[in-house]
Image (cartoon, grey):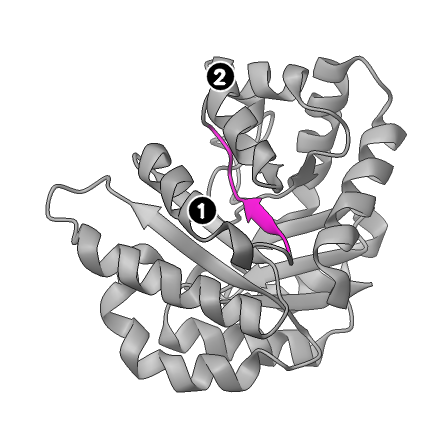
Amino acid sequence: MIDTHAHLIDDCYNGKVDEIILNMAENGLTKVFTVSYNYDSIIKCVKLAEKYDNVYAIIGIHPEEWKEFEKSKDMLKGYLDHPKVVGVGEIGLDYHYPDTNKVEQHKIFVEQIKLAYAHKLPIAIHVRDAIGDLIEVLKQNKDMLKYGVLIHCFSESVESFDELKKLGCKVAFGGVSTFKNAVKVKDVIKHAELTDFVLETDCPYLTPEPMRGKVMNEPKFVKYICENIANIKGVDFATIDKCTTDNALELFTKAK
């Protein structure tokens, strides 16, 4: 299995991250992608990826951190050709808070799409309360999506999924897909083909069932997400393990 979206540089992992990474193989994980969101996290993600063969970095500026983009831009460009940097993210749109600066979010989103295209990298997208605008931005920039798009932590409707699939996007299912009330996500899982999705934890957030509320999330819990998807699709665990690993490596080609 591959965890395509983890925040291993989060402060809550202090003193634990080395053990977590070293124990990945015995928990069925071959690779993990650690994802940045601001200036400091870009540097930390790349350093962690340099330290471990089975860790790769996805780097970019999160929409809520738009004020950090200008000071981060040159450094970001400099890292995009690094052999352990496999994508640009997490970038996107987030309208959850009422004081959101939509203009600036759109600006840095498009700039980072352009950066990814220039460096022949896929993008990993965060979207919250902004799916309509996100689809519109992707449509307007569809010529720059040829290296791949992943919508992380997908929790939108089947209709939105279909619109994104037309644009060549894949989606990532995480801990939310195991929650009892996640009806929309389960509908998308039933609807999606095996080539459409990958696995993620988004750790330390969104711990999947049955570990939810008991312990902090970490990459090894991706197995519960894989198992849940297998149950929903009516196939065995090995099938979801293989197809999601293949999908992840097809999208993030530098991790092969």
Q: Is the Cβ of the residue at disc 2 closer than 8 Å to that at disc 1? A: no
Determine if residue 45 is in view. Answer: yes
Question: Depth check: 173 or 169 in front?
Answer: 169
Depth-wise, is mark 2 or mark 1 nearer the camera? 1
Amino acid type, callout 2:
Lys
Question: Depth check: 167 or 37 in front?
Answer: 167
Percent across and percent down for residue 133 are 32, 39
Q: CA gap, disc 2 to disc 1?
A: 22 Å
Amino acid type, callout 1:
Leu
Please give the range of residues in magenta: 148-155
- Quadrant where the N terminus sits is top right
Q: Residue furthest left?
A: 99
Q: Which residue is mark 1?
A: 138
Q: Which residue is mark 2?
A: 184
- In the picture, residue 190 is in which quadrant? top right
Percent across and percent down for residue 185 are 53, 21
Q: Is residue 150 left or right of residue 103?
A: right
Q: Residues within 10 Å of mark 1 (few under 14, many from 20)?
A: some
Determine if residue 174 is in view. Answer: no
SS at mark 2? helix
Which residue: 47% across, 26% down? 160
Mark positioned earlier in the residue sequence (2 or 1): 1
